[in-house]
Amino acid sequence: MNALIYPYTLPPLRYHFGDFEPYISEWTMDIHYNKNHAGYVRKANSLMAQRPDLQHLPLPYVLSVVDGPLFDALSQHWNHTFYWKTIRPPNVNNEPFGAIEEIIDYHFNGIDCFIEEFVERGSELFGSGWIWVSLCQDGKVRMEVTKNADNPLVHGRVPIITQDLWEHAYHCDYGTNRSDYLRASFHLMDWAQVNERLEQLSS
């Protein structure tokens, strides 16, 4: 079943919760998926039950026409589903390659500068939200931070990378040190998945 079609479901994962040690604890992964994300799914289904006019529509479109608690629940479901597909168990030499390496080199002056900007911008967000790398309609690449449940889709951009900046994603492992969490996240980035997204967009 497609997790992004009503009634919504948690997406199946390609890994086990303990696979992300030592960067993300098994406990954090379990709670993040089975409590936080599951809670958004329950809320989204409960609210969508009152909107039969939207139930047959694709989630990205629904996000563009709703607001308030329904938008928050639906967008957090979309954001988390995208996030789970952006990470993978840690790889010692986890360097970008292919199309995403070319994008990082051209738009961000290489992976080191990219990581520093990613960590800095994600750490500066006051409160909760997400950090993204998105493709704009004019072909430009944008690194952006969104608050709470917001995401680039509703602003006409296509996300290719994200990282969760809500405390439930990192606080028990990193405390208030969000910058260490963001830096560690690059051991978990699934560059192959990012390249697959880029290939789908270009086809």
Image (spheres, grey):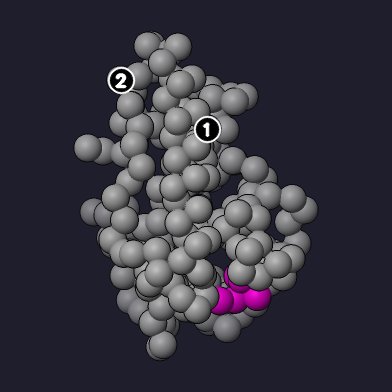
- Reading the image, the residue beneath label 2 is 56
User: Residue 193: horizontal and vertical position, in percent?
Assistant: 32, 64
User: Residue 37: horizontal and vertical position, in percent?
Assistant: 47, 44
Q: Secondary structure at mark 2?
A: loop
User: Residue 13: horizontal and vertical position, in percent?
Assistant: 31, 56
Residue at (41% x, 78% y) in the render: 90
Residue at (52% x, 40% y) in the render: 76
- Residue situated furthest front in the rendering: 27
- The kind of secondary structure the magenta stretch mainly shows is helix
Q: Amino acid at mark 2?
A: His
Residue 190 appears anywhere in the view: no
Q: Nearer the viewer, residue 83 or 172?
A: 172
On the image, which quarter does residue 99 sit in?
bottom left
Q: Is residue 166 magenta?
A: no
For the residues marked 1 and 2, what is the alpha-carbon distance in whole angstroms? 17 Å
Q: Secondary structure at mark 1?
A: helix
Classify mark 2: residues with Cα within 10 Å, few (<14), some (14-19) or many (20+). few
Q: Which residues are magenta?
A: 180-184
User: Residue 79: horizontal and vertical position, in percent?
Assistant: 48, 46
| Label disc, if present, on residue 73 of the rendered structure | 1
163 relative to 191, above or below:
above
Frontmost of labels 1 and 2 is: 1
